[in-house]
Amino acid sequence: MERMPYRDDLRLQLQQVAVATTTQQTVVATDWKQGLPTLRAGQVVLRELRTSDAASLFALLTTEEVARFISPPPSTVEGFERFISWTLRQRAAGTYACFAVTVVGYDTAIGIFQVRETEPGFGTAEWGFAIGSEFWGTGVFQDGAALVLDFAFDTIGVHRLEARAAVKNGRGNGALLKLGATQECLLRKSFLKNGEYLDQVLYGMIDTDWRGSRAIAAASSPIVH
Ligand SMILES: CC(C)(COP(=O)(O)OP(=O)(O)OC[C@H]1O[C@@H](n2cnc3c(N)ncnc32)[C@H](O)[C@@H]1OP(=O)(O)O)[C@@H](O)C(=O)NCCC(=O)NCCS
């Protein structure tokens, strides 16, 4: 999914996970390799994936409009189950994290955020995301993305976070620009989709960029006495 190095044909043993929870927007100090924390901002709750999320993710992320500009998602519920097992193994290995997106009061997974290291030690990483189209334009992406950026930079310790968006992917580009990601270059004909090589934009975000924009947002938010 979303250019992440998942292969549906890989079968390794599923490892047990322990989930630490918090209801605060601030990312908690936790050993995320043992289990992803549960994170909340506004109406959005991010948590570790479970095998039982496969059905809703299959229903929501395999539609034409969602899958149009991303690597082909698994084509069956069982394929999503194997994908979820793979995400847990990669998280335990410390090379990757994948959050389920849910909303408060409904534990159903409506999308995912993925972060993977692109060099050993997670100094640089790439992220990707997909959310069911019923939830587009609702603020779910923005709140979830802020949580994932805090997690990547503050908890994992990522220094530089990259994203790729097909030039034709208007919402994907719009969403990244709204977060303050910088368009760094054009990757010509870099993504094969349905037999056609698409141009992609490479976006970069540095830890100091994100902390700076977070500090500005905090300073401009109204003080409640
Ligand atoms: C990418 C995704 C998670 C973003 O979530 P979302 O809820 O659609 O994002 P938002 O509505 O917060 O932001 C999208 C922005 O792009 C804007 N936008 C929409 N179409 C656009 C276009 N053709 N050109 C430029 N901007 C566009 C929207 O108006 C919105 O900005 P606004 O809030 O200022 O109006 C979601 O669209 C998705 O799951 N897409 C399919 C999967 C995918 O493509 N993932 C890879 C992304 S690189």
Image (cartoon, rainbow, N blue to C red):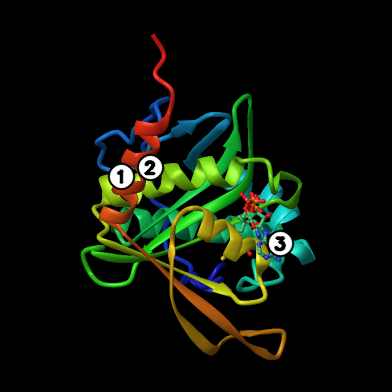
Residue type of the residue flagged with mark 3: Val
Decide: marks 2, 1 in contact (CB < 8 A)?
yes
125 horizontally vs 79: left or right = left
Q: Nearer the viewer, mark 3 or mark 1?
A: 3
Q: Is mark 3 within 8 Å of ligand 1?
A: yes
Marks 2 and 3, how far apart in space? Answer: 25 Å
Give residue 70's position: percent from left, percent from top. Answer: 62, 71
Label 3, on which residue?
Answer: 66
Mark pair 3, 1: CA separation: 28 Å
User: Is the C terminus in the top left, top right, bottom left or bottom right quadrant?
Assistant: top left
Which residue does the numbered mark 2 point to in the structure image? 36
Rendered residue at 56%/52% (across/down): 112
User: For the residue labelled by badge 1, is the local secondary structure a helix, a strand or a loop?
Assistant: loop
Secondary structure under badge 3?
helix
Name the N-terminal-most of marks 3 and 1. Answer: 1
Q: Amino acid at mark 2?
A: Leu
Q: Nearer the viewer, residue 186 or 122?
A: 186
Q: Is residue 20 left or right of residue 155?
A: right
Could you say where residue 81 lies in the image, as x and y percent from the top left? Answer: 59, 55
Where in the figure is residue 25, as x and y percent of width and height?
40, 31
Q: Is residue 16 visible?
A: yes
Mark 1 is surrounded, within 10 Å at the Cα level, by few (under 14), some (14 to 19) or many (20 or more) other residues, namely: some
Please identify, in this view, whether the residue under mark 2 or under mark 3 is nearer the observer: 3
Mark 2, residues whose alpha carbon is within 10 Å: few (<14), some, or many (≥20)? Answer: many
According to the image, label 1 marks what residue?
32
**Is residue 50 visible to us here?**
no
* Kind of residue indicated by mark 1: Trp
Judge whether 44 appears above or below 207 on screen: above
Residue at image position (21%, 64%) is 121
Taking the spot 76% from the left edge, 46% from the top edge, the residue there is 134
